[in-house]
Amino acid sequence: MHLPVNHRLRPQWRFLAGLSGAYLLVFGIVGAIRTAGEPFFSRGDTEALGLKTNPAFAWLSIIVGVVVLGGAIIGRNIDHFINIWAGGIFMLAGLVMLTVMQTSANKLNFEISTCVVSFILGTIMLIAGMYGKVGTPAESIAEEVLRHSTRPGDKFAVKPHANK
């Protein structure tokens, strides 16, 4: 897998990932306040920022929001790894919750809109993770050379020449 190093849009994607983390944090805080006193895995009609929630989902959102927002603030390659993993987990969670939505296994009180938001946040974080890798200028150049080269044996392959 060839991920770009020091991509020119890295700051913009890092900002969007941080915004996603901030949204999760605010959603979790509002949800925790609104669901205070309810059973942890309740399936009620309590909403926060337009999405159904329960105490379990609210506290999980607070934890994940802090991790994603913290990664975006810290930067370096920490945000790269956090965003790759969080993006994949959000995509998977959206799919799993979509399949169990009408069953008793819907412990986080998901509905269609929650799955859509999960897919959107997952996509943002996954792309931010893919474009968020940081390296030295030499690593960036080496990645660009590798990315633009063709398979060995191709008649148009870039062949290094020896300095004499």
Image (spheres, rainbow, N blue to C red):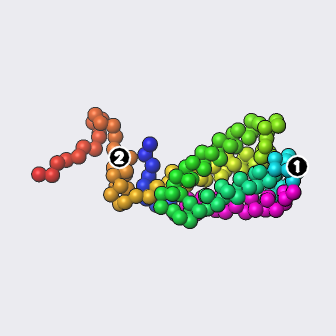
Picture coordinates of residue 159, whole percent (x, y): 24, 43
Q: Is residue 25 visible?
A: yes
Depicted 81 relative to depicted 74: above or below = above
What kind of residue is marked 2? Leu
Q: Secondary structure under badge 2?
A: helix
Quarter of the image for residue 21 reads bottom right
Mark 2 against mark 1, which lies toward the viewer?
1
**Residue on which the image places disc 1:** 44
Q: Is residue 123 visible?
A: no
Specify whether 27 is left or right of 75.
Answer: right
Picture coordinates of residue 95, whole percent (x, y): 69, 39
- Whether residue 18 is in magenta: the answer is yes
Q: Secondary structure under badge 1?
A: loop
Specify whether 104 is left or right of 7.
Answer: right
Q: Main secondary structure of the magenta part?
A: helix
**Residue on which the image places disc 2:** 146
The residue that appears at 51% across and 57% down in the rendered structure is 78
Magenta stretch: give its range.
12-37
The residue that appears at 11% across and 51% down in the rendered structure is 164
